[in-house]
Image: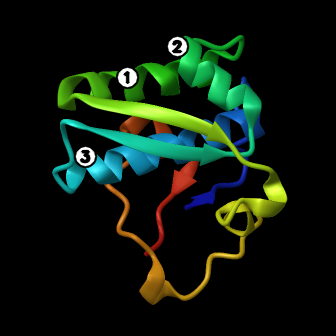
Amino acid sequence: MFVTPGWKGQGRDIGWLEAIAIELVIRTLAADGLKDTNVLIHSDNQGVIGAFQRGCSHNFQVNLCVRRVESITMDLNIALIFTYIAAEQNKADPISHGEVGLPANHLAIAQLPEELMPYISAYV
C-alpha cells in the first residue's frame, strides 16, 4: 500500500494510516473467506489499539475506519485481539517505512473502499 500525495490532513495522520492498515488486513482476510474466528493483531501504536478496543477515537477519520472494520467483523463473526509490540520487534514496521520487499511476496489487497481511493493506492 502506498499513500498518495496529499493524504495527510483533515484527521488523516499516522494513527489513521495505521488504523487503515488494520482495515486492509481485515478486508483481505474477509475476501479470502475468513469467518467465525479470532484474529490476533500486533501493533506498535497504542492509540490505534485503544481506538479499536474502545470502538472509538478522538480522531474522526480513525472512527470511520473503526466503524468499517466493526461492520465487517460483526457480519463475519470475527473477533479482533490486539496486542502491543514494540516497533523494533514489529516485523511489519519496515513496511510502514516503505521497505516492502519483493513483489512476489505481497498479498493481494481486497478492493479499497471508495472513500479511501483518493489517499491509498494498492500495489500494481
Q: Is residue 84 left or right of residue 117?
A: right
Q: Is residue 9 left or right of residue 61?
A: right
Q: Check disc 3 and report the residue beneath it.
A: 30
Residue 53, given in percent of the width and then of the height, sits at 56, 19
Q: Check disc 1 and report the residue beneath it.
A: 70
Q: Is residue 8 above or below residue 28?
A: above
Q: Is residue 44 left or right of residue 71?
A: right
Q: Nearer the viewer, residue 3 or 74?
A: 74
In the picture, the disc for residue 55 is 2
Q: Does residue 95 appear anywhere in the picture? A: yes
Query: Which residue shows up at 47% across the image and 44% down it?
Result: 40
Residue 33, given in percent of the width and then of the height, sits at 16, 51
Query: Which residue shows up at 48% across the image and 71% down it?
Result: 123
Q: Is residue 6 left or right of residue 49?
A: right
Callout 3 touching callout 1 (CB < 8 Å): no
Q: Amino acid at mark 1?
A: Glu
Question: Label 2, label 3: how many angstroms apart (C-alpha)?
Answer: 20 Å
Callout 2 touching callout 3 (CB < 8 Å): no
Residue 15, given in percent of the width and then of the height, sits at 72, 34
* Quadrant including the C terminus: bottom left
Query: Which residue shows up at 61% across the image and 83% down it?
Result: 101
Query: Which residue shows up at 71% across the image and 59% down it?
Result: 90
**Neighbourhood count class around disc 2 (C-alpha, 10 Å): few under 14, some 14–19, many 20 upward:** some
Q: Nearer the viewer, residue 117 or 62?
A: 62
Q: Secondary structure at mark 3?
A: helix
Residue 29, given in percent of the width and then of the height, sits at 30, 51
Q: Amino acid at mark 3?
A: Ala
Q: Does residue 111 appear anywhere in the picture? A: no
Q: Secondary structure at mark 1?
A: helix
**Between discs 2 and 3, the one toward the N terminus:** 3
**Between discs 3 and 1, the one toward the N terminus:** 3
**Between discs 2 and 1, the one toward the N terminus:** 2
